[in-house]
Amino acid sequence: MAPSLQALRRIGLPAVAAALALVPSAVLLGGTAASSGAQAPTGRVAAASGRHGAGGGSAGHHGGGGGGASIPSGWAGFGGNLATWSKARHRDVTGCVAGWCFGAKVAGPIAAYAFNDVTTTNGRVTGWWQAMPQGTTPAQAEATALGLFPDDTQFSPLVVLKHDLFGASCAFLNVESKTLASWFGPKSVVATNGQVSIELFWLNPQGYPQWRPSDIDRVIVVPVAYTQGDNC
């Protein structure tokens, strides 16, 4: 895992993105990590297969909250109360085809709200699709996504999956936080041991994930860790 976010946040988002751009990534080819100086992150995946299609569907609810420590009332990131998210971001239901939608629409091959398909666990937000402006780099997307996690969050090198079982391509990184572990508790099936995964890709007009190193327009936060063999 890389250093925590606490130090990186002191230097601001552009500098964080620049620092992340220097972190090596591993490329998965046919399920095997190519030699690149990095190893695929490890973790445990609960029932989260079939994570997404074209971004449609309804808002989900993950069961199995473990009854952990209290989350700060004003926290509007991962694990925050849905009501707090609603106060911190404008919610829109006009044309929202993917459950809870927050923020302005972001242009792209498939336009989407800034946050959509927001899922909850016992009223706490534990997953979402996040739309990025066209031309967003992987490092910029990572930095933006990581901004919604606690300061003690650590993150793995980016792992690029060039071709999954369905012909899609994307990239993953795992994040881990002792704060998240304390919030959700030892029996939780989400954020188990404080581990969560983030997925990055460009969503093509047909609704399939594609890996574009110079253009990331979707980030998905999934409340379980990525493990080798997962699909985009």
Image (cartoon, rainbow, N blue to C red):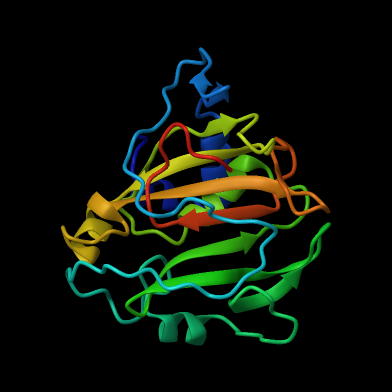
Q: Is residue 192 above or below residue 92?
A: above
**Residue placed furthest toward the top:** 35
Question: Which residue shows up at 59% across the image and 41% down it?
Answer: 139
Question: Which residue shows up at 66% across the image and 85% down it?
Answer: 92
* Residue 104 visible to the viewer: yes
- Return the x and y of residue 165 as percentages of the image width and height: 61, 34
The image quarter containing residue 122 is bottom left
Q: Is residue 202 above or below residue 72?
A: above
- Return the x and y of residue 94 as percentages of the image width and height: 73, 86
How many marks the image carries: the answer is: 0
Left-right relation of 154 to 34: left
- Return the x and y of residue 32 as percentages of the image width and height: 50, 19
Left-right relation of 69 to 52: left
Q: Is residue 5 above or below residue 133?
A: above
The image quarter containing residue 68 is bottom left
Classify the position of the C terminus by image quarter. Answer: top right
Question: Which residue shows up at 51% across the image and 12% down it?
Answer: 35
- Return the x and y of residue 180 as percentages of the image width and height: 27, 59
